Image (cartoon, rainbow, N blue to C red):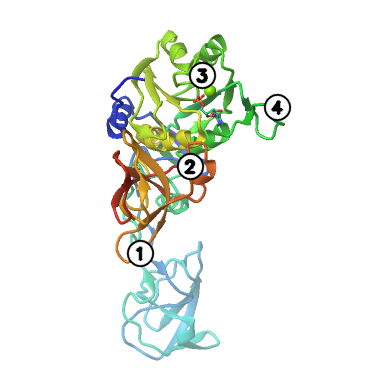
Amino acid sequence: MPQPLITIRDAQRTVLEATTRLDPEPVDIEHALDRVLATALTAAGDVPPFACSAMDGYAVIADGQQGRLAIVGESRAGTPSEHTINAGETIRISTGAALPPGATAVVRQEDVSRNGETIELQVSPEPGANVRHPGEDMRAGTPVLAAGTQLEAPHLGAAVAAGAGSVIVTRRPKVSVLCTGDELRAPGEALGPGEIHNSNAPMLAALAIHAGAAAGSPQRLPDDAAATEAGLAAALEAADVLIVTGGVSVGPHDHVRPALSRLGVEQHFWGVSLQPGKPTWFGTHEETLVFGLPGNPVSAAVTFSLFVNPALATMLGTEAPRPPAKQARLSTAVPRNPAREQAIRIRLEQTTSEPAATPNGPQGSHILTSLLGADALALIAPGDGDLPAGTLVELAHLAT
Ligand code: AMP
Ligand code: MG
């Protein structure tokens, strides 16, 4: 690995400089959950589209007159009354039904006494009482959702109310996950001597999907130069983002870098001043981003969070996810790495001032349980000895 190692920020900048936004495509509203809007969505018409009632009751002319009113019709949701109200008249009206011509207010049915086909008002309504005005929620032609919005349930409701049947979203990045290692067995398989389960495969595919990408089934590659090259070549064909785990270090069975080089993938950096995650490799092949992440699962999750997640957000044209707070105070002393910045998995606890950060158990790069229930990464600058309790540290998003 080259010395000195690139810093986390320089590595992030390098990745983002090589990343471009993907093309927009239309998608039906029913398939738009979690997609990212490529263009702002404006209201096609006023919402509500017409003056309507906010209550079940009686549409009236609010002229301060009391006395009996004759019920001359009904306006139901979806079936407006066409009768124009005259003095002394009222029209029965349901919530959401169009206000009949001439009416200026609605009196709740609780506020009238009904006698056959007449009513007597027990209140004197102001003009506009219990009336929903056209455009009160959205005005025709005005923006409702900004470009870059990741569509959650309320956004879908608002888009449909605004008149959309489909939306223009950014194409999902296609992510291929390749896990190298002779020792890896598929989830649930019995382990032979020296073997471990391929925990990176489902975890990284899930991280990619949570970040808004489309991830196919992860592939396993043996620690063999030819097989590594063939597997990488096939994946490069189809992917916008190729994530390879393991095999990027300096061991005799680490075949990923030479294979990528033979395939013409241009190296942008190899080796980050980061613990865990030092052997992280990044390169590009035409528009495809290639991340070589370390094999240790915690290193893979941390480097995904720091480098892959922001790239996926940029491809999608949305904001990179942020940690719950910018900074937190260490609740306990943390041993420093003399040379590299550390990204420790922490739990956050809200105190009266800033949140308190507590390491989420042992921090070894093979300790997968340190990811469980962690709220963020705390970035610990290199140095000698412990960083004392009470120190304010910067937080980074931990992808889940
Ligand atoms: P490597 O980066 O290939 O040297 O692997 C570093 C460590 O991570 C080794 O202990 C590997 O067994 C382990 N490892 C590599 N790939 C995976 C994987 N897909 N799932 C779980 N552990 C892995
Ligand atoms: Mg390996």
Contact, CB < 8 Å: mark 3 with mark 1? no
Q: Which residue position is annotated with label 4?
A: 192
Task: Tally the numbered discs.
Answer: 4
Contact, CB < 8 Å: mark 1 with mark 2? no
> What type is the residue that disc 2 sits on?
Ala
**Between tags 2 and 3, which lies in front?**
3
Q: Residue at x 45, y 32 (%)?
A: 172
**Between tags 4 and 3, which lies in front?**
4
Looking at the rendering, in which quadrant would you find the N terminus? top left
Q: Which residue position is annotated with label 2?
A: 32
- The first of marks 1 and 4 along the sequence is 4
> What type is the residue that disc 4 sits on?
Gly
Q: Which residue position is annotated with label 3?
A: 235
Which SS class for mark 4?
loop
The answer to which of 154 and 125 lies nearer the viewer is 154
Real-space CA distance between mark 1 and mark 4, rounded to the nearest whole angstrom: 48 Å
